[in-house]
Every structure is written in C-alpha cells, then in structure tokens.
Amino acid sequence: MIFQSNQLSCDSTTPEAEDRTKFKRYFQILPSDIHFSQAFIQILNTFNWTKLHAINLEFHLFVLVCDLSLYVFKHLELVRVGGAEGSGTLNRLESLEQLVPHHNFTSVSYSSDPRATNTLDAILSNGHAFNTESRIIYLAMYMDDTIPVLCEAYHQNKVYPLYVFITLGWYPDGWWDSSTVNCTRHQIEIALNRSLAITLDPQINDTDIITSSGLSFNQYRKLYLEALNRTIRDLRSDPAFNRLAAAASHLPPNSTFYMENFTYANDVILERMYQHLMNASFTGNISFSANGIRKAEHIRIQQYRFNNSNQLQKFDIGYVALDQNGQSVAFDFLPGQSIKTIWPDGVPHDGTLITSTINIELGVTAVMYILATLGIALAIICFIISVAFRERKLIRLTSPNINYITCGGCMVLYTSIFFLAIQSTDETTATAICNVQIWLWAIGYSVAFGPILGKMYRVYYIFNNPKPNKKRVIKDWMIGVLISVLAGIDVIILVIVTAVPELRTTAVLKHSTAYPQIVSGIFHVTTINCIFICDSQKGYTIWHGVLFGYKGLIQVVAILLAFGTRNVKVKGLNDSKHIAAIIYVTSICLVVVIISFATLRDKVNTLVAIYSLGFWCAATIILLLVFIPKVHDFN
C-alpha cells in the first residue's frame, strides 16, 4: 500500500523515478540528472571542445549520467530511462549529429568496494584514471573521492592550463579538505583552479510574489534562516518545505479529520493530497512534469578561481537555458562574465591532436616536374625523328610504327610523374590523384615496355625456331596486339579494383612517424604531422602486389628472351643489344620502385623522389637506347 501513497523525495535526482507505472504518486524536489548531458553539450560547443573524459564511481547516480552522456555523444535520438518497453519514459534528447559532430566521450569507473581491483587508489596508481587524450575531465563522484583525484592531478601536473576539471556543483562551500591526502590545501586549490561546476539549480525566480502561504519567498526565507540561525543556503530546503506544506494543506479549513485516522486505503484523501502537491505553491512557483519530476529551466555553470585576495572561490559564470522539453537551448554568460574573464589566457585545449598535412617539398616537386617536362620533350623529339626518317633503312628496321607506340607509352609514364609529385590537403582531390597516378604509370609502363618485349620476342623467334618459315614472321601488327593485351590486363586489374568498394583506392590521412610531433604554447597543443597516402579498405598491398607481380613477370620473360639472344650479331637486327640493355635497366628500376613502395610509404618526399625517378629512368632509357643510336648512325 505504501507505493500507492504520495511520496516526496527531497534529495533524489534519478531519472528512473519518472516511470509512472512504478511510482504513481511520486514527487522529486530536485531536477533530473538527465540534464547533465545537456549541460555538457552546451559547454563543449561554447568552448569549442570535442573531447570529454569521465572518472566515475560505480554507483547508479554517477553511472547513469555517464551512460546518458555517452549515448548523447554517439548521436542517439532517444534515450530510455528505466522500465521495460512501453512502461518507461522516453526522454527526447533530439538528434545531435549536427549539434555536436565528432565529439569523443570516454570514461573510466572505479568501485567503492575495497576488495575490487578497480578501486580509486588502484586506478590512480596504475594511471588508468588519466589514461586519455582528453584534457577535459568530468569527476562524477562524491567530494571525498574528488579530493584524492585532484591531489594526484597536482602531482602529475594535470592542472590548469593543461587540464580542466568539471565537478558537481552541489558540494558545500570550502569542501576541499586535504587532511586525508598527500597534498596541502593550497595544492588542492591549484588543481581545482579554473575548474567548472555544474548545478541543477532549482532556484525560484518570483521571489516577491505572495504565495498560498501568505508569504513571499523572500519573507519565508528570512523566517527560515532566523529559525535555523544560519546563512548557508540549502537547495533542497525551500522546495521541500513547499511540498510538505502543500501536503499538510490538503484538508479544508476547520476539518475534523485527524491524521491518526488516515489510512492508505482512503483514495479521496490521497487524491486531494496529490492535487495539492502538484499545484499548491507556498514558497514560490515550482513546476513539475506530468511524471512528478521538478522541471529545470536552466542549469547553473560555475567556476573555481582565485579572487583578488588569492582565495579560491566559486563564481557563477553563466547558465544553460532549457526549453519546456528539457532540451538545452544555449549557454548564456552572466553580466560581467565572458570567455575572456573565464579563460584570460585563452580557452584551454581539449587534447585533440592538431593534424598538419605534410606536402611534398617544393624542391622535390620542382625537380620532378622539370625532369618530367624534359622527358616529354624527349619523347616528342624521338617521335618526330621516327616520322621524319621513317623511310631510311635504319629506322625501317626498327619498326617505326612500333616506335610511335613506344613514344606514346613513355609520354604517359612521364605524365604520371606530375601526379606522383603533386600533393593535396583535400581528401577528395587526393583520392582522385591516387587513382589517376596508378592508371597512368600502370598502363604507361606496359605501353612503353610492350614494344621492347615484342621486338625481343621477334629476335628470339627468328634464331630459336628450328623450322623457320618466312610466312610466319612476327609482324608489327602482332606486336601491336601483344601491347594491347599487356595494357588490357592492366585495365582489367584496375577496373576490378575500382568496381569493388573494399578495394577501391582512396586517400587516407595517416600520422607519419618520419616527422616529430610539435608541442606549442602554454596549453601544450600537440601537432602531429600527417600525410595522405593511397590506400583501400582491404587488400591494397595485395592487389598492388598483383600489379607489380604482373610487371615483374613481364620483365622476367623479357630477361629470359634477352639472355637467349645474347649471342646474336646480325647487322640487320641492329637494335637487339640495345633492347637487351633496356630490359636489364628497366628491371632494376622496377625492383627499386617495388622496394620503395613496401618500405617508404610514410616518408612522402623520399617515396615520391624514388618512385618518380624510377619511372623517369625507365622511360628515358627506353627512348635513349631505341632512338639515339639511330641518330648516331645517321652520321
């Protein structure tokens, strides 16, 4: 029967009491702890913080607040507070994806059971308490536990301006007693300096309005303090008296009904008392939700800081305004308070690592661009030579049509260097560059080297065919087909990689260990150097290995053909030795490129230089050894 009676809680703040299926006549004097998460949202947005770390006692009061905050940070639209499906209260926290994007909430909990392995002393001594990148730390615990945490923070220099703590605002004045820890009171004050405090303040605003008691709030307050002979304000006393007076006034004047005659079965009296609890006002207007929970209009934000007398004092700095649904609207500073007065040296850093995207050094880019431009010019000159002197016997013997293809392939390979040596700080642009450079060097290499392989196979076929047949000579169009097949295999591999989302190449920003971190300013802001590297969700190294393996297989075949024709000394095949030299040199270039890909991906300047030089050398050797000897023979 007791659960059918009217219940009044002066100290509880749990949101679980909102479940009217369990607590039908329950009233809660203080606002619900669910509003803490709303305060965190506005504090983080106001000071542009994106990280929050909580150290919380494994007690329902504190765990629930941390859990709610974690849900908020994960952008949940609804949070259930107690009860089974359909019986609890769904508290609308609204979608926060645009309100607090990319925030990071972490927590570590400790047990009050001395037999547990995660006691407060344990997590302080083993470093778990502060094992976080975040420098904004919420202490969800009773004040007796807050003191040793602040003491340890002082010894580890985790104090302002490097760290900011957020505490509960209902601790009494001067609560930081250092007698139980290895710190002086002043050291605790140093750790607490510039910390914030959140108070679910049930302050009554209409303090001069005459209430049902015949007194205004100010008149009641004066009588109350005189009766207690004290000046300390108790947040619970005023609303508690308000509700108790309302309950006592549920009987009409001159009633002959006495409380000793009351029973819990008297529904008329219970209902009358319930209505008085909901609506009567004796010390000022108090508003309850339909579930009997005190409505909060704002959340008070305070800050500990040293006053002009060098005494640590708690100052009111602002409040988080709440709408009728309990959702945070904005953080408003009180008159005389601002970001400049709260943080005179600037807003403390939240521990978020600042990323600095490393670009390829201008000198490396300039050299590679010059070499690529010279290479393209060389390819154009070689193309012009082949066209201008195609009727000469020396040029005719080297298959000028195939030489055109060689020039085109080398030009594509040179062009890939422009994309290899360019760096972007934009992810979309960097992703496009990654894909373009792979397509260019893969296809360009096959088109440039394909004619070399075809010509070498023709020489090998002539001198190693036991039954030579003039009608079965390897003609230029056959070599053209071979080149198409080689480039076609590249296209197939790259199309498959592009079509499969897990394999698709994207630019990924990663921390480069090749460059040191930079710590700057009084807030020790840490800047890490990052680079965009080409990667994929799965198998980037594998499919790159397939692509390089395919190129390597072509080189191995070419080397075997060159070795098989090493003794050929026929004048008509005047470029066979040069072709063999091309095969050997380009094989070395390819090996160097493969090794650099496997070992130097985070050393952007070195990788770009070796990659670009490898392909540049391969293309240049092909052009020089195919065309320059012919120019020499003209003379």
Image (cartoon, helix red, strand yellow):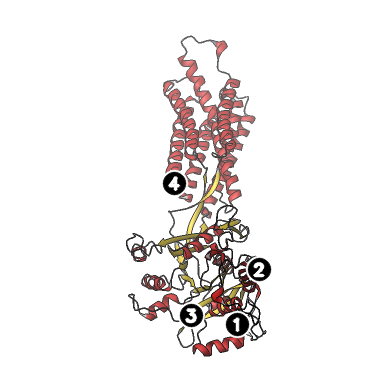
| Residue 128 position (above or below residue 173) | above
| Image point (58%, 28%), residue name | 488
Question: Residue drawn 64% across and 74% down?
Answer: 276
Are there few (<14), some (14-19), or many (20+) residues within 10 Å of tag 1?
few
Kindly report the distance in space between the C-alpha atoms of the residues bearing marks 3 and 4: 50 Å
Kind of residue at badge 2: Asp
For marks 3 and 4, the one nearer the N-term is 3
Assess whether mark 2 and mark 4 are in contact (beta carbons under 8 angstroms). Answer: no
User: Which of marks 1 and 4 precedes in the sequence?
Assistant: 1
Q: Which residue is mark 3?
A: 305
Cα distance, mark 3 to mark 2? 30 Å
Residue 587 locus on image (x, y percent): 45, 33
Q: Identity of the amino acid at label 1?
A: Gly
Q: Nearer the viewer, mark 2 or mark 1?
A: 2
Q: Which of the two residues, 422 or 492, is positioned nearer the viewer here?
A: 492
Element type at mark 2: loop
Labelled disc at residue 600: 4
What amino acid is at disc 3? Answer: Arg
* Residue situated in front as seen by the camera: 622 or 560: 560
Tell me the quarter of the image containing the C terminus. top right
Specify the amino acid type for callout 4.
Answer: Leu
| Figure check: 475 above or below 124 | above
Query: Measured from the top left, where is residue 88 in percent x and y?
Result: 58, 57
Which numbered marker is on residue 323?
A: 2
Which residue in the structure is indicated by mark 1? 336
Question: Gap between marks 1 and 3, in whole Å?
Answer: 15 Å
Instruction: Give me the C-alpha separation between circle 2 and circle 1.
Output: 25 Å
